[in-house]
Amino acid sequence: MDGYGPLGVMVGIGNLRSSVSLSHLVVLAALAKLLPLKRVLEFGSGEWSTSFFLNKDVFPNLEYLESYETSKDWYDHVFAQVISDPRVNLLYVNKPNLNAASIDLSTFDLCLIDSDGATRGAVINTLVARCPDNLLIVIHDYENPNHKITVENVQPFVITQVAGPQTALVWRGDRINRDELTVLISTIK
């Protein structure tokens, strides 16, 4: 399996989980409690996720957020929300898979992939194939067949709900303790 940690857990309670579309925020909040996440990479800026990363109560260690967006209208919308925070670098790009292939991933602690559907599969597989030991990759809406990992010997940790989106995690080595993550996810409110 090339050192990737395959895990599985059920998610579905608490205030953050009251909206199924926010399932990835529960996972991100748990990871922020488990790990000192200082540098985050985001493919697909989000009205919820980008602002969530910048919330000092949830991500107290965040020093830098680099976020790539392919929709100009959405970029403008999110940019207006986060412009005042010097920790964020929001970038409008046409081909995020090219950025995924050239970014120095070793400088980031976490990468969230929630980009548009047309490019997400390529971004996912480019990043997973290049995943260094220090990087934790979070994939939102993993239930979509076009968002599956096709890199050989990779088994993601898939967090699922009875109804709603799945969130998958991919990492190398022993960076995450399954039991600790399971407990944290179950206690996020």
Image: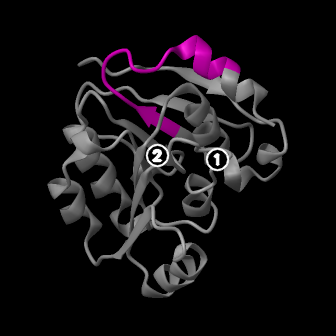
Image quadrant in which the N terminus is located: top left
Q: Residue at x 77, y 36 (%)?
A: 12
Residue topped by disc 1: 25
Looking at the image, which residue sits at the far left?
102
Amino acid type, label 1: Leu
Q: Residue at x 54, y 61 (%)?
A: 50
> How many neighbours does mark 2 have within 10 angstroms: few (below 14), some (14-19), or many (20 or more)?
many
Q: Nearer the viewer, residue 116 or 133?
A: 133
**123 sits to left or right of 116:** left
Amino acid type, label 2: Ile
Element under label 1? helix
Image spot of residue 34 (x, y percent): 56, 26
**As displayed, is residue 186 above or below residue 86?**
above
- In the image, residue 50 lies in the stretch drawn in magenta: no
Image spot of residue 100 (x, y percent): 24, 56
- Here the colouring is one colour
Question: Which residues are drawn in magenta?
Answer: 168-183
Q: Residue at x 19, y 64 (%)?
A: 98
> How many neighbours does mark 1 have within 10 angstroms: few (below 14), some (14-19), or many (20 or more)?
some
**As displayed, is residue 128 above or below residue 48?**
above
The Cα atoms of the two marked residues, 1 and 2, are separated by 11 Å
Task: Of the two numbered discs 1 and 2 on the same chain, state the one appearing first in sequence.
Answer: 1
Element under label 2? strand
The quarter of the picture where residue 33 lies is top right
- In the image, residue 169 lies in the stretch drawn in magenta: yes
Image spot of residue 90 (x, y percent): 41, 71
Residue topped by disc 2: 139
The quarter of the picture where residue 120 lies is bottom left
Q: In the rendered structure, find residue 155 and report the number of the disc placed on it.
A: none
